[in-house]
Amino acid sequence: MAELSLSTSVTKSADTVVVGLYDTGKELALTGWGRDLDNHFRKAHGQTLLAAAQVVGASAKLGLTRLLPDGQRRLAVVGLGSDLNEPMALRRAVGSAVRTIIGADTGARQISLSFGLDEPGTIKAIGEGALLAAYRAPSQSRQEAAPSPHFNLVATSNAATKRAVILAQTVASAVNRTRDLVNQPPNQLGPADLAAAAETLAADAAIKITIWDEVALATEGFGGLTAVGGGSVRPPRLVRLSWRPRGAKTHVALVGKGITFDSGGLDLKPPASMYTMGSDMAGAATCLAAIVAAAELQLKVQVTAWLALAENLPSGSAFRPSDVLTLRGGTTVENYNTDAEGRLVLADALARAAEDEPDLIIDVATLTGAKQVALGNLTNAVMASDDTVADDFLTAAEAAGEAFWQLPITDEAEEALKSTVADLKSGGKREGGALVAAAFLRHFTAGRPWAHLDIAGSAFNTGEARDCRPAGATGVAVSSLIAWLARLSA
């Protein structure tokens, strides 16, 4: 993975220097080291850097990047818009610049980021933008992978800016760790494999871990996990990770959907819809990365992460539509569709998480196509037990630079869960499907403060890479969770 460091000036080893161009309201102006380069550029090239950049089409348009040669190094001039104090815009602009540099196959290895900005929030955004855009998915191709670049962020060096750089590196590492897991081919990452990966990460971060195998799940009444995982030769797992620092006053439970491949089960998906379903474990990967980051940052908040892991395949032992399942805690559920399996494994894990009486429960899942219909693939849904919980999360998400929108849990959605043969039906109403799923999950939270994050479509980008968002796994929601945990830790 790419690395980030802090220095007070552009390093001599830099082969590429990135500076910003912004609109002051009266004229275009260069930021950071770019201002100092004007005289040098006039002497070396007969015109100022600003003039040379404009000749090749540079402007203040956010993210627009132009490359210029300067002896043995390259200069990248990126548009920053008109507000240098907007972290989300800075993150995107720097991401676009790094993606342009790498995409131009310049062979850049040492990249200095010089914007003349010293506020910790902007430094964190700049660092994250660079590190997230430099991500490359693991490959099993015989072609040798290009070395990861090193980023040198030019700013004043003090305790606050050093902390901002560490935070940027930790958050980006957590996001990229999630991306790596979600990008794994599904034949190489079954439930036991993902549990083993969690075990390795937990050991490295001094996090306690417990794993339930299929026998323990059946014995202890996890009827959702055993039903969903029953069609595969790779049995389900439930993973509990615990970070419990001294001085923690708040206990947060993270619950992640971990369907390592979702064929739809007996309600089989069309082939085109199945191709990306190795990414259906993104919620579990997100929760895993978030608790590891909490431990790395030594956040003073108790975090318990629950990973509900299963593979949903059709076979003679697969569960059926109309089956009545008994979930953790004894709630009976009439299953309406085997392709609505995520809510069943989450319900088991939510019920178990609630038994520990945490102060807050958050579940994360690539749960419904209805969320994609409602909000698209760039905006994520949050539904919550109350507006206070939703507002707290949305504040953290905004600070993290991620787009979330609150959706309601309506009486109409609750009505769709009525069953004549069981305590609940797992769904069945097409309209408002994301709301129905959230209403179902709420029944397993024991009335505790709770937020449900639906990241369907957002967690895996089937289109082209764009600024900090790569093709394939995106790692969405990781930075928002870390920001929320940090707020609860303060």
Image (cartoon, rainbow, N blue to C red):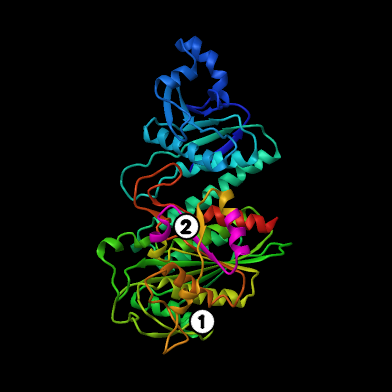
Q: Is 348 left or right of 388, judged from the image as shown?
A: left
Q: Please determine whether, in this image, residue 440 is positioned above or below residue 291.
A: below
Circle 1 sits on which residue? 328
Q: Looking at the picture, does residue 287 appear above or below residue 410?
A: above
Q: Is residue 126 left or right of residue 359?
A: left
Quadrant of the drawing holding the C terminus: bottom right
Tell me which corner region of the image, top left, top right, bottom left or bottom right, holds residue 267: bottom left
View extreme (left): residue: 271
Secondary structure state at the residue bearing disc 1: loop
Q: Where does the magenta region start and end?
A: 372-395
Res 377 visible: yes
In this rendering, does residue 71 appear at all? no
Of 11 and 407, which appears nearest the observer?
Answer: 407
Is 455 in front, or is 223? 455
* Amino acid identity at mark 2: Asn
At 41% from the left edge and 34% from the top edge, which residue is drawn? 100
As for residue 320 lying within the magenta part, the answer is: no
Residue at image position (69%, 58%) is 300
Q: Residue at label 2?
A: 380
Residue farthest toward the bottom in the current orientation of the protein: 421
Whether residue 268 is situated above or below residue 93 in the rendered picture: below
The picture places residue 411, in percent across and down from the top left corner, at 50, 75
Residue 320: percent from left, percent from top: 33, 81
Q: Are marks 1 and 2 in contact (CB under 8 Å)?
A: no
Question: Which callout, 1 or 2, points at the residue further toward the start of the chain?
Answer: 1
Q: Residue at x 44, y 88 (%)?
A: 422
User: For numbered disc 2, what is the local secondary structure?
Assistant: strand
Q: Is residue 387 rendered magenta in the image? A: yes
Mark 2, Cα crowd under 10 Å, few <14 / some 14-19 / many 20+, is many
Residue 472 percent coordinates (x, y): 38, 52
The type of residue carrying mark 1 is: Arg
